[in-house]
């Protein structure tokens, strides 16, 4: 049913010119409220690196156009209204769910990157290296491509703004959402005012170690729980497969006895 709906949508969009993506965006962007929404959502998607290749056009197409067309097609085919609503809601929330999943997965990776940077900075600052040089030296410890690019851009801005970290960090802090990232940004800002960056980073390093071990513990518990559930389901399935025929046979024998 869903595949038929998608095929119907494909031919429908091919035939109807008013469903052209470019024309639709030009039409809707004339409305101030919609235009403001498109710009805001586009900036958010760009800031988080267009997860899974979702830009503003793909986001609008999936969330609003495809979901609405599928709903119309299913209703015109007199499909059960509950199923129609489920399909509509699935496509309507799909891009948002993908973004949430992407950000959750990225937050875990960024925490590990922050830990590497902090360890690198502690070693650099302990040897008497200035803050900017310690930040620059820590780039080699970053493996995540997006984070490395944004961190390098931040350092370029840091130098451009005459080592004013508050100005340089404005765009950088919007790119990632993990708590550890926000804490690291806070330490950098605080260091400009108080100058206790090494001490603060050492304290923060202990917090990062605790967060990482906590994550590993959660991951192991989650894996154990998943294995346990799969084992129980397999045992129940095996039990039913074996015991069901035996139970039927016993029932038939009892019926014959009491006849």
Image (cartoon, rainbow, N blue to C red):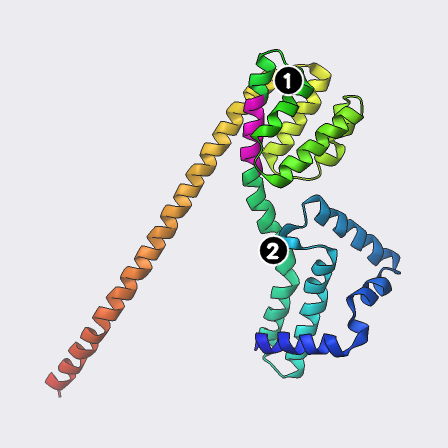
The residue singled out by tag 1 in the image is: 197
What's the residue at 76%, 51% (across, down)?
Answer: 42
Q: Main secondary structure of the magenta part?
A: helix
**Residues in magenta, as a range:** 110-120
Residue 175 within the magenta-colored segment of the rendering: no
In the picture, the disc for residue 35 is: none
Task: Name the quadrant of the N terminus.
Answer: bottom right
Drawn side of residue 68 relative to residue 214, left or right: right
**Crowding at mark 2 (Cα within 10 Å: few <14, some 14-19, many 20+):** few
Identify the residue at the far top of this view: 128
SS under mark 1? helix
Q: Is residue 228 above or below residue 12?
A: above
Residue nearer the viewer, 82 or 203: 203
The number of numbered badges drawn on the structure is: 2
Residue nearer the viewer, 148 or 175: 148
In x, y percent, where is residue 134? 63, 20
In x, y percent, where is residue 7? 63, 77
What's the residue at 53%, 29% (across, down)?
Answer: 208
In the picture, the disc for residue 97 is: 2
Find residue 255 and report its image quarter: bottom left
Find residue 34 and report its image quarter: bottom right
Drawn side of residue 93 relative to residue 241, left or right: right
In x, y percent, where is residue 135? 65, 24
Are the residues flagged by discs 1 and 2 in contact, CB closer than 8 Å?
no
SS under mark 2? helix
Q: CA distance from mark 1 to mark 2?
A: 38 Å
What's the residue at 66%, 78% (across, down)?
Answer: 8
Q: Earlier in the sequence, mark 1 or mark 2?
A: 2
**Crowding at mark 1 (Cα within 10 Å: few <14, some 14-19, many 20+):** many
Residue nearer the viewer, 149 or 8: 149
What's the residue at 76%, 29% (across, down)?
Answer: 157
Task: Name the quadrant of the C terminus.
Answer: bottom left
């Amino acid at each position: 049913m869903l595949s038929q709906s998608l095929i119907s949508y494909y031919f429908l969009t091919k035939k109807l010119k008013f469903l052209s993506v470019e024309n639709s965006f030009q039409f809707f962007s004339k409305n101030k409220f919609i235009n403001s929404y498109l710009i805001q959502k586009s900036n958010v998607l760009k800031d988080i690196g267009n997860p899974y290749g979702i830009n503003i056009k793909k986001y609008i197409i999936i969330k609003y156009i495809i979901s609405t067309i599928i709903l119309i097609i299913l209703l015109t085919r007199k499909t059960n209204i509950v199923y129609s609503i489920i399909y509509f809601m699935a496509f309507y929330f799909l891009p948002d769910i993908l973004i949430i999943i992407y950000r959750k997965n990225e937050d875990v990776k960024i925490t590990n990157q922050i830990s590497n940077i902090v360890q690198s900075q502690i070693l650099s600052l302990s040897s008497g290296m200035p803050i900017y040089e310690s930040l620059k030296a820590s780039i080699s410890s970053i493996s995540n491509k997006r984070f490395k690019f944004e961190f390098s851009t931040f350092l370029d801005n840091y130098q451009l703004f005459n080592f004013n970290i508050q100005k340089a960090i404005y765009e950088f802090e919007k790119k990632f959402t993990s708590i550890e990232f926000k804490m690291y940004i806070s330490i950098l800002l605080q260091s400009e005012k108080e100058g206790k960056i090494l001490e603060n980073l050492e304290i923060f390093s202990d917090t990062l170690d605790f967060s990482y071990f906590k994550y590993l513990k959660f991951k192991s518990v989650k894996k154990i729980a998943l294995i346990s559930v799969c084992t129980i389901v397999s045992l129940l399935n095996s039990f039913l497969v074996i015991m069901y025929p035996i139970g039927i046979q016993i029932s038939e024998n009892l019926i014959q006895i009491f006849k």
